[in-house]
Amino acid sequence: MGTDRFAEESGRLNDVLNAVNLLVWDSRTQMPTGGAAARGRQIATLTAIARQIATGPAMRDALAAARDEVAGEPETSRRRRAVAAMEDGVAALDRIPEMLLHEAALLKTEAQAAWVAARARSDFPAFRPYLERSFALQRRIADALGWSEHPYDALVAQYEPGMTLAKLRPLFTTLRGRLVPLMQRVLDRPPARRDFLDRDYPVDRQKAFARSLTERIGFDYAHGRLDETVHPFEISFTRDDVRITARYRPNYLPAGLFAALHEAGHGMYEQGIDPEIGRSALATDIVNLYAVGGASFGMHESQSRLLENRVGRSRRFWELNFGLLRDAFPEQLGDVSATEFWRAVNHVRPGLIRVEADELTYDLHIALRVELEAAVIAGDLAVADLPAAWAERMRADLGLEVPDDARGVLQDVHWSTGYVGSFPTYTLGNIMASQLFAAAERDPTVAAGLEAGDYMPLKLWLNRAVHRHGRSRTPEEILQAATGNGLDPEPYLAYLEAKYPLGEAG
Amino acid sequence: MGTDRFAEESGRLNDVLNAVNLLVWDSRTQMPTGGAAARGRQIATLTAIARQIATGPAMRDALAAARDEVAGEPETSRRRRAVAAMEDGVAALDRIPEMLLHEAALLKTEAQAAWVAARARSDFPAFRPYLERSFALQRRIADALGWSEHPYDALVAQYEPGMTLAKLRPLFTTLRGRLVPLMQRVLDRPPARRDFLDRDYPVDRQKAFARSLTERIGFDYAHGRLDETVHPFEISFTRDDVRITARYRPNYLPAGLFAALHEAGHGMYEQGIDPEIGRSALATDIVNLYAVGGASFGMHESQSRLLENRVGRSRRFWELNFGLLRDAFPEQLGDVSATEFWRAVNHVRPGLIRVEADELTYDLHIALRVELEAAVIAGDLAVADLPAAWAERMRADLGLEVPDDARGVLQDVHWSTGYVGSFPTYTLGNIMASQLFAAAERDPTVAAGLEAGDYMPLKLWLNRAVHRHGRSRTPEEILQAATGNGLDPEPYLAYLEAKYPLGEAG
């Protein structure tokens, strides 16, 4: 009966965390402005209740009984993995003292407000004391969680289990070594036509097109919704109710289009989790007290990047689907060809802002952040020296001068909210997306589908190889089983080097 | 420090119940169809957690300490009322055995599904066993809660504290005695013109008009929303975030219009609760484990009926506002006068269906239900004899033959979901609405506002007299303070007798 009680306690935890997810989704898509303060308290109360359930006596008793019951099962059995996930999660929650969490919650509110104000005035000195406290607190959290080689490892592992700085550094060295010269070769070519992207695109029609396109690639609207928001995100309340969002700009078509494709990739991951683990420890991120079915932040990002970039920015995709887009916007796109559109949405240009970066420069932005945040956490770089270090790296990698801190070190919200160690997962997502896509393309049914504009075979392949497992397999195990390799940047670099500079034809 | 801990525990309870309210709101306005089963589990888990908080040791300790601290305060002090409300609520929750709640939850799911199926086929015999079990269970709940004169009293008191069948019976006798002949006098007159009500009214324009009209009468959109749903309702997540809903029929204008006014009345009640009690026991219905600030179901209904009927169906209101409506629907209402519109939306005709009833016949539908449900609960009427009793009463009061049970005893969802004893609150709402409106009109500022189409003085009067108190005053205390009288049907009957038959002028 231990596993029953364990399943029941895990289910209760999952229910509470899914309710938190709804409180968050609503606050970002529906809530009237006046509701913010009360909502913050409601989220805090439910999160505290979730922590009590995870670390409470009922869970410990159930875990102890379940541990004995599953001991004879294979190491990879789902029941055993669920018990292990809860044990590891509870152990991590136990390691962080309540006081530290309390401090982190208070600092987050303060630091985020300070960041908003400092960014608006491009005033790094005003934000510096908050950033120093924020990094100091994250260092204490790293020490509480425990680490052997580098304190950064403890933070990264919250988002990407098993990942370390020692594994990340050679990855980023390889990427920089090949992306910088590739970017240079692209910049030597004349730029493609892009005038039509910022014509007047009525938002209602953008929404309708985003809905039909995401449905076409496999997002299930019987178990999901697509809404508008300021900063697009995906969130779910079990696999049966997955909410994706996009932001539409009336004078820039790609923003809403690719946001919808990106979030649909996240959403299809959650929708594809096996029903039998849909309300279990294998659909719950215990350490972060977050109801999610994806194996890690990086693996989740692999699914969004795969849909957005490997499918949505491919030449074949627009050869097959540009007609539908032109039907939706005949006045705006009547004088544009599929190839012109494809070229325009794959335009490469070094820029100061990460979230506006193209495929070739995006990982250079990440490499910079990973190196700097790891150095600060280790005490090798002072927060006061961040702007200079930032500027130096932007000059070296992207050939750009940083004109002000708003477009430099102040541009991301992450550090102010305590998300130190999450940046690597964006690049890990890119790498895994290409490994998985290369393997999927070797399946003749998938390849034929992509050639014909039928995305169901790809969806089914991803369901089988990635989605269904939820958190019962590590990213490394998923990659090994699906591709025959562990984490490997080669397919990603091979793809970029084959694609750029964009071919001549058309 | 007892009151601090008590406030903290009450606040946690309120937070959890507000999260349940959001889960409910979302399920009725946003949720994809596939999300229903998971949502049901999430609501059940959070409701169980709320019950644990209310009846748990932390609350009992905090209550014991707070009780001593407030003992020296006046009986009507808010702190003392909050402690009393929690004590009474916890005592009631304690009285109902866990097993009975479990049975009720299971039966509700089963009986509601059976009711939907039975109503569709107008098959009372198929529903009868569920209805028998449902009434039997409600009787056991009444016995568990405790009663002295009549078991029905225990059930009614869940929704209207202090109300009893002994108080209700003379009320309904008075109402029937004067409404039946009044209805007869109206039926002797030729019917008013109504052809324009079912023209083609585009739903988007109906929505925009409902939004502007509800804003005009005082609903605050910085702390609220208006959405579409199937069965309109109001629900809140504290006073700072109040959601109202309406259902629009493309070929019948009054449906959406009056639903929005009705729900805005409920919503303004919640928005008007004093901020200091917004997250306390005085904004929580402990017995029903429901986050709500209104004093009782009846008092809540008084606010919706006041806006919908006393304001929204008055001649002056349409003399002042019909121009705005005609501007919104020029093709549909170009040939209609304000007086014609007012007459049309006050059309009286006996009908079989409660939710479609007009002001004069509505309470007759309620009188029938109250008498029958009280008789069944007492064991004086068998469930099997309900259809015949229903038919007899419809014939006697409304002069109508019931052609089938779908349009008779099967029409309401209430009994299948365990809401026995809630029907009287609709009529209590009508009565209290007229008492309060008569008192408000005696305030010259309110009267001048109503004459000029300025509804802010009325809103402020209701804020002061009713809303701000939350659950810190009983309905009887609110009525006494605001009108100088306890519950009294005379102002309601005087209003109806002065209004109907509709005057000749115009």
Image: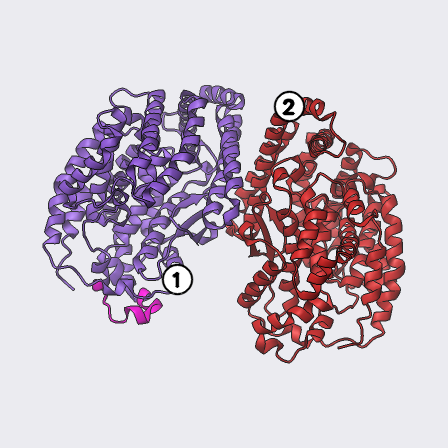
Chain colours: A purple, B red
Which of the numbered marks, if any, corresponds to residue B129?
A: none
Seen in the image, is A94 located left or right of residue A155? right
Residue A497, position as x, y percentages in the image: 14, 48
Residue A398, visible in the rendered structure: yes
Q: Is residue B109 above or below residue A487?
A: below
Closer to the camera in the image, A113 or B327: A113
Q: Residues within 10 Å of mark 1 (few under 14, many from 20)?
A: some
Name the dominant secondary structure of the magenta segment: helix
Going 52% across and 47% down the picture, which residue do you hit? Answer: A34
**Gap in Å between the C-alphas at discs 2 and 1?**
54 Å
Going 33% across and 26% down the picture, which residue do you hit? Answer: A136
Which of the numbered marks, if any, corresponds to residue B2?
A: 2
Bounds of the magenta segment: A325-340
Q: Quick check: is A327 in the magenta stretch?
A: yes
Residue assigned mark 1: A203
Query: Quadrant of the image for the C terminus of chain A?
Result: bottom left
Secondary structure under tag 1 reads: helix
Seen in the image, is A10 located left or right of residue A246? right
In the picture, residue A116 is in which quadrant? Answer: top left
Name which residue type carries label 1: Val
Of badges 2 and 1, nearer the viewer stands 2
Residue A173, position as x, y percentages in the image: 15, 35
Q: Quick check: is A289 in the magenta stretch?
A: no
Q: Is residue A31 above or below residue A9?
A: below
Seen in the image, is B72 located left or right of residue A240? right
Seen in the image, is B37 located left or right of residue B493? left
Secondary structure under tag 2 reads: helix
Residue A485, position as x, y percentages in the image: 22, 35
Name which residue type carries label 2: Gly
Whether labels 2 and 1 share one chain = no
Tell me which chain the residue with mark 1 is part of.
A
